[in-house]
Image: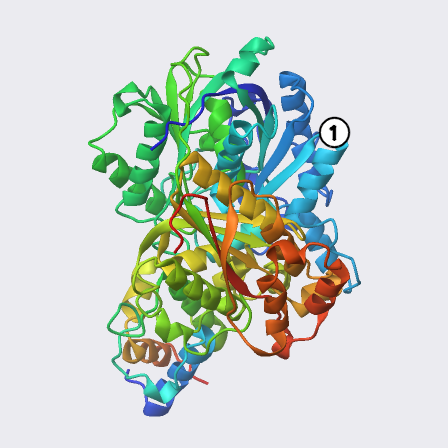
Amino acid sequence: MSASEAQKLQVKRMLVDQLHLRMEAEEIGDDTPLFGDEGLGLDSVDAIELVAGIEETFGLTFENEEQARKVLVDVNTLAERIAAEGKFA
Amino acid sequence: MSPGPRLAITGLGVLTACGRGLEALRGAPALGTLPAEVAQGLPRTYGGRFPAALVDPADPERAWVAGGLALDDALADADPPPGCLLILGTGLGPMELQLARFAEPPAPGQLAGALPADLTARLAASRGLDEGPTFCVTCVSGSYALEAAQDALLAGRAPAVAVLGLETLNRQIQAGFCALDALSASWTPGAPPPADGIVLGEAACCVVLEPLDRARARGARIHGVLLGSGVWVDATHLIAPDPGGAGLAQALELALDRAAVGLADLDALTLTADTSPLYAATYAAALERLGGVAAPRESWEAAGGHALAASASLGLAWACTRPGVTANLTVGFGGQNAVSVVARAADPAPAPIPRPAPGWVACAWATGGAPDLEDRFAPRWNPRRPLPAELRPALEASWDALAAAGWGDTPGTAVEGGLVLAVDRVGLAAAERFAAQVDAGRALRPGEFLASLPSTPAGTLGLVLGLHAYQATLCHPERAPLDALEHAVALLRRGALGRVLLVALSVREPEAERRLDAAPAATLAVALALEADAGDVRVAEVRAADEGEQSAAGALLVDLSPSYRGLPAAGLLALARAPAPGGVRWGARCVELTRPGEEER
């Protein structure tokens, strides 16, 4: 299930708020990698923060690390998962 | 590289979840389900606490009680000569006391007595010991205490040093390690920790160290001999060591070098937190780098759990009970790697004479905080993430100090050198926020837990500055800068490091301030540190880093050396108390110290 632009923007705002990014939500590309030097440059501590933030904001939890790894790729994959679980308000 | 001094271990005091004494730690596992007040609602609910008969589980003074038991046993064992110094290594100090006081409405002075250094002061005063520094460097706190103990003995500052490693297991620490996802998910009661994470266990372990010749001369019982130790920080990540094991291999080589023994001489290795997959991989990689080590690996953690800041002193005590030469390996947050080498035999090679080595200290004392710091440090920091606000001035001053010192053309690229950080009470506000988060049953935020650790500022500074090799944090509400200066100078004199960046950091945390009712003493303490009798160290250059209201403090410091003497302390305190924008306040300057004979930079 693909997510709408508005839903993706919600995800981007969550990223900026939870991780205190020095950028506007709109500046984040849908397919910008969350981790690694090419993308937002998040690290392993950010990953745990992000999982906590996703749970807090959307009520989405991950069953295991493997599942989280597949979802925490970029805004597209994250928003799709939240939409598929019906977690967007 | 100067070989280190041979130090006799003449006193042992061990208290763990298994009970009192080291033999208990070799017995049945004592890990189990933690009481509700510690673990209720947390994703991991097991660990090891001191036996209730020895330390009351509900006593907010359990750190004081446990530390006292271990200290008393060690002192009774060693019967050290008068003037024995106490040096404490602890990650969080008397956290139960802090948690109890966080739960009450803020009142002035409420947190006085609940800081890590307060524990050192109380324990020392009550036992007639000299109060030494307090190191808060998470799992390797005890390793840094050992380094300082060696320096104190070498310099003749004390005839004996009691090194106490101490960590209690409370709701804050258990929740913090849950937030970091560092605890085993599959442990079952009665079994040793499986290889998917650690199980925490509280511990207090004290070892009394003395110069070997003097211990022999006074007829002391010698349990073992500390042959050498090594610390190496790889500054790779805030909570992980270099996974390639380079930093740990370096620490092991340093320790072996100072001990003047080879890998093949080792009869055993003790590894801490090696059930963490990350750390296990680091250990394996480090040993592989050195060509493999045949010695068997041992650990007390199956019985007593991971002892955090008590690990280093437990390693010494453990090595005293097994034959041969043991290397104790510890890794910790901030890319910390520490190793000690201990021989049970009391007759190792004659003590080598250390050679003084040239070295210098760059001292940063910062106010303000430049707006473009993230961009400046982009090579070592993700510029999309803001640097912690409370560290910005320290980074700005460090930038200046590093540039003035000529430590690499671009601050932020990797530089080999030491970082010694003096903090008064950093992390209290974050600790209180994290405690509230835990109590409210909200999703645990690892960032808040990390921010509550006194060692995190140094870890972050080291990471951002790219300053690796050594990274100590000394905590004291007043004299931390003095302790830090002394520690840094001792490291230089011993030849352990060629250069050190000394940063004094005083964070004004309005929430914590209400509970402390204490003047931010760091301004005064830094001033005192700069005029302190540092022997062969002198002030070579003083740099101002900021303008405006805060530059008044700088002007004082500029005039510091001889002309400062006699300046009323009240004047400095008034400056320190002056309001600052944003409720965060810093003192700030940067000064370079050199030894005579060193070319001025």
Pick the residue in front: B136 or B330: B136
Vertical order, A75 against B505 (above or below): below
- Classify residue B253 by image quadrant: top left
Disc 1 marks a residue whose amino acid type is: Gly
The answer to whether residue B15 is seen in the rendering is no
Image location (x, y in percent) of residue B194: 39, 39
Q: Is residue B538 above or below residue B67?
A: below
Using the image as rendered, state which of residue B550 and residue A25 is in the foreground: B550
Q: Residues within 10 Å of mark 1 (few under 14, many from 20)?
A: some
In the rendered image, the vertical position of residue B511 relative to residue B45, given as above or below: below
The chain to which mark 1 is attached is: B
Question: Toward which corner of the image does residue B352 lie, by quadrant?
Answer: top left
**Whether residue B132 can be seen here:** yes
For the C terminus of chain B, the quadrant is: bottom left
Task: Name the element at disc 1.
Answer: loop
* Residue pointed to by mark 1: B128
Q: Residue at x 32, y 44 (%)?
A: B247
Count of all numbered marks drawn on residues in the image? 1
Decide if residue B264 is on the left or right side of residue A20. Answer: left
Front one among B387 and B128? B128
